[in-house]
Image (tube, helix red, strand yellow):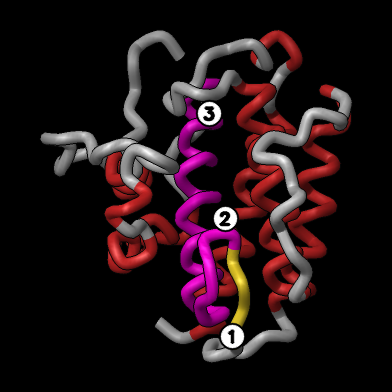
Amino acid sequence: MNFAQQLQDYSDACRWVGDLAAATQAPQLDARTPCEDFNVRSLLGHLLGTAHRSLGTARGVSTRGIPHVITDVGDDKLAATYTALASEIREAWSHLAAADPVIAPWGPCTALEAARGFTVETVTHGWDLAVATGQRSEAPNGIAERCLGYATTVIPDQLRGVMYDAPVVGADTAPPTERLAHLLGHKRTGNE
């Protein structure tokens, strides 16, 4: 996959998450998600933090001080804030080439590798949000299928148990977005 396609996938993933966030109702913010660490509100805060880290990566700015979960955005502003960040992300990443060196939150890599990592993270947490809020949980335009082709290369084994749980076993027949989520250890619990 070329870098232009990767950036389009990342942009589409961000747009999908923005749409999911916009359709989330206030009473759903306290609902559990397949990502055990988060309810819907904190998941949206984590997606905001991820978006800020993506911007920092693309702009060459340190991401160390960006919280794991952004908590200072009001419930009624979560979706609009994410959508605005998604627009900035598209602009910032458009100035990079695939082989450009960047410092992602997980360390030095190429812009292509970083964009892949942020795409996998965004699609996986988009699935979490969709499942928790009863929305369509398959990412658009075949993004998840393409993510599955490289996801294992952007999820180092040393991050298992730290940032990611062990893959869900026996989930090979699920749709692509759910398989991607399973690869990162996310699964439906029946309580979302």
**Mark toward the start of the polypeptide (1 vs 3):** 1
136 with respect to 87 (left or right): left
**In this orientation, does residue 5 appear?**
no
Q: Which residue is mark 3?
A: 135
Residue for badge 1: 101
Q: Position of residue 179 (x, y in %)?
A: 28, 44
Magenta region: which residues? 105-134
Residue type beneath disc 1: Pro
Q: Is residue 29 above or below residue 68?
A: above
Which quarter shows the N terminus?
Answer: bottom left
| Closer-to-camera residue (111/181) | 111
Residue at the (63%, 64%) spot, across then down: 11
Tag of residue 13: 2
**185 up-or-down from 26: above or below:** below
Q: Nearer the viewer, residue 116 or 129?
A: 116
Horizontal side of 121 relative to 150 (left or right) equals right
Q: Is residue 109 magenta?
A: yes
